[in-house]
Amino acid sequence: MRLTVLSAAVAVLMGLLIHTSGAAMRSRGKESFAVYPVGRIHQHDTHATVEIAPAHQDALLGLEGFSHVWVIWWFDRNDNPRERAVSRVHPRGNPKNPLTGVFATRSPARPNLIGMTLCKIRSIEGNTIRVDRIDAFDNTPVLDLKPYIPGFDGAPEATVPSWLGDKSM
């Protein structure tokens, strides 16, 4: 029993050390993952920017040829055991919508707090991408960027549940 409590305390401390060093690491069995922010989202009155860390600026080469980019980001303000344990929600927080599994929603409460938004690229200057908007808070960590490729990312035959209606957001 004492060893278990001690092990749990060490695990919590290790988690805090890893988290504060800029990496989020989780381990289950032999699998281990480390995720590091590559940048931050900044909200402005009329637009948003995705600022990539200078160490990753070279990774932006060629992105200017695309009109849109998928921004993959971390729901950092929801990163707690309670939010990670949620498996079903009423979509959009509306109790009139049916109880639905989080994997069938865009809920910020989920086991892994990964968000993604398709953004229209307005400009790229140095390590900063200016976009119209993004549904993330100011200073949210960016995990990755992926170019939007219509042949791969578009799904004209896609269907959605009735609670979503014609709305895409």
Image (cartoon, rainbow, N blue to C red):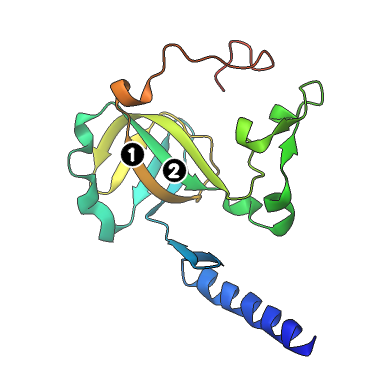
What is the x, y in percent for residue 81?
A: 71, 58
What is the x, y in percent for residue 60?
A: 23, 45
Quadrant in which residue 26 is drawn:
bottom right
Residue at 53% x, 35% y: name it: 135
Q: Quick one: 121 or 28, which is closer to the camera?
A: 28
The type of residue carrying mark 2 is Ile
Residue at 39% x, 41% y: name it: 49
The type of residue carrying mark 1 is Lys
Rendered view: 128 above or below 21? above
Q: Which residue is mark 2?
A: 72
What is the x, y in percent for residue 72?
A: 44, 43
Rendered view: 157 above or below 97? above
Helix, strand or loop for disc 2: strand
Task: From the viewer's perspective, tell me whether residue 14 is left or right of residue 65.
Answer: right
What is the x, y in percent for residue 115?
A: 52, 41
Dot 2 or dot 1, earlier in sequence: 2
Quarter of the image where the C terminus is located:
top right
Q: Report the Cα–Cα distance between label 2 and label 1.
A: 8 Å
Quadrant in which residue 71 is drawn:
top left
Mark 1, other Cα within 10 Å: few <14 / some 14–19 / many ≥20: few
Q: Which mark is residue 31?
A: none
Task: From the viewer's perspective, tell me whether residue 89 is left or right of residue 135.
Answer: right
Mark 2, other Cα within 10 Å: few <14 / some 14–19 / many ≥20: some
Q: Which residue is mark 1?
A: 146
- Say whether marks 2 and 1 touch (CB < 8 Å): yes
Task: From the viewer's perspective, tell me whether residue 155 is left or right of residue 65.
Answer: right
Q: Can residue 115 be seen here?
A: yes
Residue at 19% x, 30% y: name it: 65
Q: Quick one: 47 or 156, which is closer to the camera?
A: 156
Rendered view: 158 above or below 26? above
